[in-house]
Image: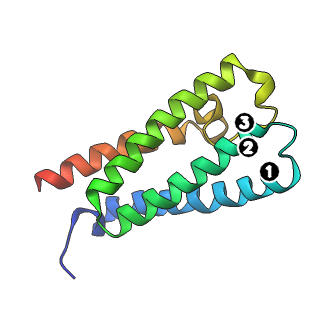
Amino acid sequence: MASNKTSTGPGRLLIAIYAIFALAATARSLYQLSTKFTEAPIAYSLSALSAAVYILATIALARSFNRLATYALIFELIGVVVVGTLSIVLPADFHHASVWSYFGAGYGCVPLILPIWGLWWLSKAKRA
């Protein structure tokens, strides 16, 4: 297999973090959708969307589909900013924090930092 930027140490770390977030967000959103959906339908629908984006980003990064990964990370960054803003403006709709609500504060703001790091990494991969 030809070497690429995502097959190196930092690239593997990025993919591993995305994989962990994909698994965690998927499990959490499935639980929320199946047990608590009526409490906060907007928040839990957005939680499911974040899980789908993490899955897509993980696969795109792991398979070196750089264009798809770039689109997924841009969508993720926009999602974190929009959902973070909504969660502050409409806190009643976010009874339990989702991955992107409050700009990912419950996750150490990693959901806000991760797409920025990923986009930076992909820009370096294009130059190499």
Q: Residue furthest top?
A: 89
Could you tell which of marks 1 and 3 lies nearer the N-terminus? 1
Identify the secondary structure beneath mark 3. helix
Rendering quarter of residue 52: bottom right
- Residue drawn at 33 percent across, 70 percent down: 63
- Residue drawn at 19 percent across, 49 percent down: 124
Label 1 sits on what residue type? Gln
Question: Marks 1/2: CA distance?
Answer: 6 Å
Label 2 sits on what residue type? Tyr
Q: Which residue is mark 1?
A: 32
* Percent of width and height locating residue 74: 38, 41
Q: Which residue is mark 3?
A: 42
- Residue drawn at 62 percent across, 63 percent down: 23
Q: Which residue is mark 2?
A: 44
Could you tell which of marks 1 and 2 lies nearer the N-terminus? 1
Q: Residue furthest left?
A: 128
The label number, if any, that marks residue 63 in the structure image: none
Label 3 sits on what residue type? Ile
Q: Residue furthest bottom?
A: 1
Q: Are marks 2 and 3 in contact (CB under 8 Å)?
A: yes
Give the class, few, some or many, for how many residues have Cα within 10 Å of label 1's Cα (few <14, many ≥20).
Answer: many
Question: Marks 1/3: CA distance?
Answer: 11 Å
- Residue drawn at 53 percent across, 41 percent down: 111
* Residue 73 visible in this rendered orientation of the protein: yes
Using residue 77 as the reference point, say whether residue 5 is left or right of it. left
Q: Nearer the viewer, residue 14 or 123?
A: 123
